[in-house]
Amino acid sequence: MVDLIFKEKPYSTLVSLADDSKAWYASALCKETDTTFPHMLKILKEFESVGLIRTHTVGRIKRIKLTEQGSRIAKLVQETYVLLNEQKSVGDSNNVLEKGGSE
């Protein structure tokens, strides 16, 4: 599951689905994440197989929502992403300081 979530498109999809102010369906997620429709269907199938999302049909549209587990994981993934980027920024600034101090 780790490989699935930390790839760019699945990550973007998971984060988008965490925004529950929108009614999500596959083509809307494609536009939001700049993903092809076949690739999005593959991502959604994998998410559904591990219990991150559930789908329900409204008219002709299949809506997609995060499960409780999916919501928890989306939140944790977003927090992890922020922490990793903060760590990277701190590491980059330390490297700049070290370079500046040795000259």
Image: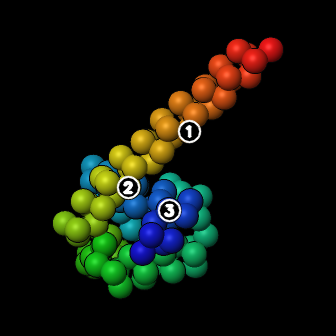
Residue designated by label 2: 77
Cα–Cα gap, marks 2 and 3: 8 Å
Alpha carbon distance from label 2 to label 1: 16 Å
Local packing at callout 1 (Cα closer than 10 Å; few below 14, some 14-19, many 20+) is: few
Image height of 52 relative to 46, above or below: above
Which of the 4 quarters of the picture holds residue 16? bottom left
Q: Which of the numbered marks, if any, corresponds to residue 88?
A: 1
The tag on residue 6 is 3
Between 44 and 76, the residue placed more toward the observer is 76
Q: Indicate which disc, 1 or 3, sits on the residue closer to the N terminus.
A: 3
Q: 81 or 71, which lies in front?
A: 81
Question: As shown in the figure, which amino acid type bears the numbered disc 3?
Answer: Phe
x, y percentage for residue 2?
45, 70
> Element at badge 2?
helix
Q: Secondary structure at mark 1?
A: helix
| Screen quadrant of the C terminus | top right
Residue 68 circle label: none
**Secondary structure found at label 3:** loop
Q: Are marks 2 and 3 in contact (CB under 8 Å)?
A: yes
Going by the numbered disc 1, the residue's amino acid type is Lys
User: How many other residues sit within 10 Å of disc 3, few (<14), some (14-19) or many (≥20)?
Assistant: some
Residue at position x 40%, y 61% in the image: 14
Say above or below: 11 vs 87: below
Assess disc 2: are there few (<14), some (14-19) or many (≥20) residues with their C-alpha within 10 Å of its C-alpha.
some
Exactly how many numbered labels are in the figure? 3
The spot of residue 9 in percent (x, y) is: 54, 63
- The reply to whether dot 1 and dot 3 touch (C-beta < 8 Å) is no
The residue that appears at 74% across and 22% down in the rendered structure is: 99
Left or right: 11 in relation to 61? right
Q: Nearer the viewer, residue 1 or 18?
A: 1
